Structure formats: C-alpha cells, structure tokens
Image (cartoon, rainbow, N blue to C red):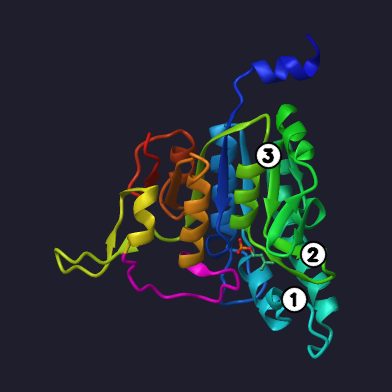
Amino acid sequence: MDKRELILNKNNNIIILKLGGSLLTDKNKPFSIREDIVKGSVRQIVDAKEKLILIHGGGSFGHPLAKKYSIMKGIDSSIPNQVLGLTETHQSMNEFNSYLIKLFLEKKYPVLSIQASSIFIRDSQEVSASSMEVVETALDLNILPILYGDIILDKQGSFSIISGDQIILELCKNLDRYRISKVIFTMETDGIYVSDNESGEDCILATECYSDQLENLKLANLDQKIDVTGGIKGKINFIQKICNHNIPVQLINGLKDEYIYKSLKNQKLDCTNILIKR
Ligand code: IP8
C-alpha cells in the first residue's frame, strides 16, 4: 500500500471554518485589526485540534481598497491607477493574512497560506480551480491550509474579487479526497435574523432551518457596513449553493465565549443551523 492509499483509508472528514472580515477587523477603519478577537479565535482553533481548512474575509484590509478602485467591476481605463490598486488590494490582504499566520506559528501550529489568486481563475462567470492538490496535500501532512478573500484574474483579461464565501463554495465543489462535514461561518451576530409574521416580531434569530427554506426567509433589516461582495443576502446565496453539495452550514457568533471551539467540537450553541434533508 503506498502512502497515498494509507492516507485515503484514514478518517477524511474535515470542517471548513470561515472567520468573517467584520469580526476580525473594524470595517469602518481601514487596516485595523481587532487583535484580541483575532488572537482569541486563533487560540480556540489551536485548542480544538480538529482537521480543518480556515478561510478569512477581507474586512478593513480588503473592502475599502476594492471599493476605491472598483475592482469588482473589472478593468476600466477611466479609473486612475486601477491595476496598481488591484495589486495593492492583494498585498493588503497578504499583510492581514501574515498577521494570522504568525499567530499560529508562535503557537507552534503548522499552517500554510494559500493565495486564492494563484489557484483560481475566472472564465466569464465561472471560477475554475487549477488544482486542489496543494490544499489536499497540506491536509495529508496535518498542515492547516489558510485561504482568504483575494483578487482574482480572469481569462478575458480582466479581474474582480473572489470572496471567502466563493472560495468555500469552490472547495466544496472541487475537493476530491476529503469530505466536508460542515461549514462554519463565524460572524459578529448570532446568525440569520428574520421577521416573523405570526408573532409580529421583526427581528428574531432563525435557529434551525432547512436549506430549501432559505429562499423564503423574510430577512430582518440589519445595518450593513461596506461590503463589496454582497453582505448577508450574498451569504445566503452561497449557503444555498454549499447545501446543494449536501453539506450542513452553521452561522455562529465569534464574539461569544469559546463559540469557535465549541462549534468545532460540535457542542450545542445558540446560533443558526442550516440543515440538509436526508
Ligand atoms: O470579506 C473579500 O472577501 P470577503 C476580499 O470574504 C476583498 O467578502 C479583497 C475585498
């Protein structure tokens, strides 16, 4: 039996954990890290010792620059220095990611930063993944792969942004040798809030919901900060697509005591669970 077969025979379940950019940074203040929250999140991941892939969002390192240069709209020669702005956006995300990577390494926890802009390319509306081998081989070696919202180039010679949520969806579609047991979105709220016609309450937490009910949820109106990749409505759209791969999704509050740890350990939480009908 070769090494690869041995690995395949082992338990190959993994979790995908997303740490939202608005949780980790102050989205209203460019380039500001919420250090205590980031450090607390890293510690909980290290303590949990679960096999996972970590994804983080852009927060104040990605969205303000992406907005300033209209990166989402693609190449536009009327925007001064747009291509330079594209590369600055990428570099800004790298710097934020390096901060996280260093925290893991200080705890002697093996992590590998994988740049989405190097492994994905867009072709019209579709994202294609050149290879998931790097991610899977890192997992084989018990290395925690870390990916993050980034810029993405496209085959038509333009560019846009690939959000952390889109990266998760691509992993759900393309991972071959690993089975994703759940996707956790860590945010600064308890989950999805809805308005309830029956009780007349206009903001209650949806604690459990089947993926096929997502479409009909009456979302409560919550404040939105700058988010070039779509806010909660965009997130629900991605969640539906993730669930189409039979993967349950959990949305949790990363500000609550040990919630990241507890979620990784499948403990009971006050949060939103999106379930799959079997
Ligand atoms: O915060 C966006 O990633 P997200 C990344 O996951 C950039 O939407 C560069 C704006």
Kind of residue indicated by mark 2: Asp
Helix, strand or loop for disc 1: loop
Residue at 62% across, 64% down: 33
**Closer to the camera, 248 or 139?**
248
Quarter of the image with the N terminus in it: top right
Label 2 with label 1: CB-CB less than 8 Å:
yes
Neighbours of disc 3 within 10 Å: few (<14), some (14-19), many (20+) = few
Task: First in sequence, mark 1 or 3: give its number.
Answer: 1
Which residue occupies the extreme left position in the image?
199
Kind of residue indicated by mark 3: Lys
Residue 194: give x, y in percent of width and height. Answer: 30, 64
Instruction: Identify the residue position indicated by label 1 in the image.
Output: 74
In the image, taking residue 143 as reference, residue 80 lies left or right, namely: right
Residue at 70% across, 32% down: 139
Instruction: Identify the residue position indicated by label 3 in the image.
Output: 107
Q: CA distance from mark 2 to mark 1?
A: 9 Å
- Residues shaded magenta: 218-232
Mark number, residue 154 = 2
